[in-house]
Image (spheres, rainbow, N blue to C red):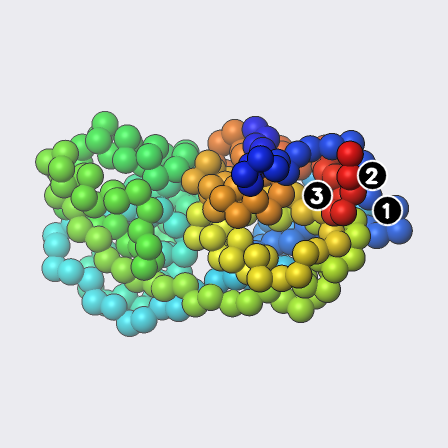
Amino acid sequence: MKRRCDRGNTAVMLRQSRAPAAVRPAVILTRPAAQSARFAAQLYARLGEGFDILCSPLMEPEFPATRLPDGPFEALILTSGTALEALPHLTGSLPPRAFCVGRRTADAARAHGFDAVSADGDAEALLALLLDQRPQGGLLHLHGEEPRGDLVVRLRAAGLRAEGLCVYRQRPRSLAAAVIARLEQPGYVLFPVFSPQSAQSLAEALRVLPRPAAMMQFTAISRATAEPLLRFCLGPVSVAAQPDAGAMLDLLDPPPWDNPCLEAPGSKD
């Protein structure tokens, strides 16, 4: 789904225009390094190598030593695979099961020895799964400083036993100098964005830069992720049909620079 951004009576519209052929298209990945590397490999496998990839993580997780609450708990709730990276920093008894937001998180949980169930979606899909299955034991949501979906509050309101525990925090990072330099060149620059927090950080980072020469486009994994990008009117935004990496790849196949549609900065009707 493509969206238009309005600023007063002026709209950032899609127009037919080709980028200068001398500058290769670029994809900027702002996820943590390991996740960016995985998605970069998927992109090259799907699209070939007629473009550049630059990695500039905007967040770096930190894992403070944390003691688990006493419980007992029947299962974990996992809305991000990052919570699993916190496990070596936790003390206390972990339950054997895990309810996970998506398949990749569930696969990672199984690799850690959990009996994992995937909601195959977003936080709302995970909430629906939990309300359908209604586990009788306690549920422990391991999350970052900004948990998704108010799951604990909503589960408690539905009569389930649930607690939340912050097990990591994200330290912000600036855009890499190589990314800023690329934005100063003409040609297509695409930002795949995978979370509302990343979208907000990216929007704020781009807003303070001089107007780029590059023609920026964005793909968002969800409507919530698209909102900060649309609010700041940074460029055309496409939203994935499903909140997963596969749907994000589908948005980029064929790649937008093969069918260019964004008006170059400074061009006029």
Q: Amino acid at mark 3?
A: Ala
Is residue 179 something one can see in this rendering?
yes
Q: Residues within 10 Å of mark 2 (few under 14, many from 20)?
A: some
Q: Secondary structure at mark 1?
A: loop
In the rendering, which numbered label is found on residue 18? 2
- For the N terminus, the quadrant is top right
Residue 123 relative to residue 185: left or right: left
Residue 1 relative to residue 65: left or right: right
Q: Residues within 10 Å of mark 1 (few under 14, many from 20)?
A: few
Which residue is disc 1 drawn over?
20
Residue 158 point in image, percent of width and height: 14, 34
Q: Secondary structure at mark 3?
A: helix
Residue, x 52% and y 41% (percent of image)? 230
Above-or-below relation of 149 to 174: above
Residue 74 point in image, percent of width and height: 18, 45
Residue 68 point in image, percent of width and height: 20, 62
Which residue is disc 3 drawn over?
45
Q: Earlier in the sequence, mark 1 or mark 3?
A: 1
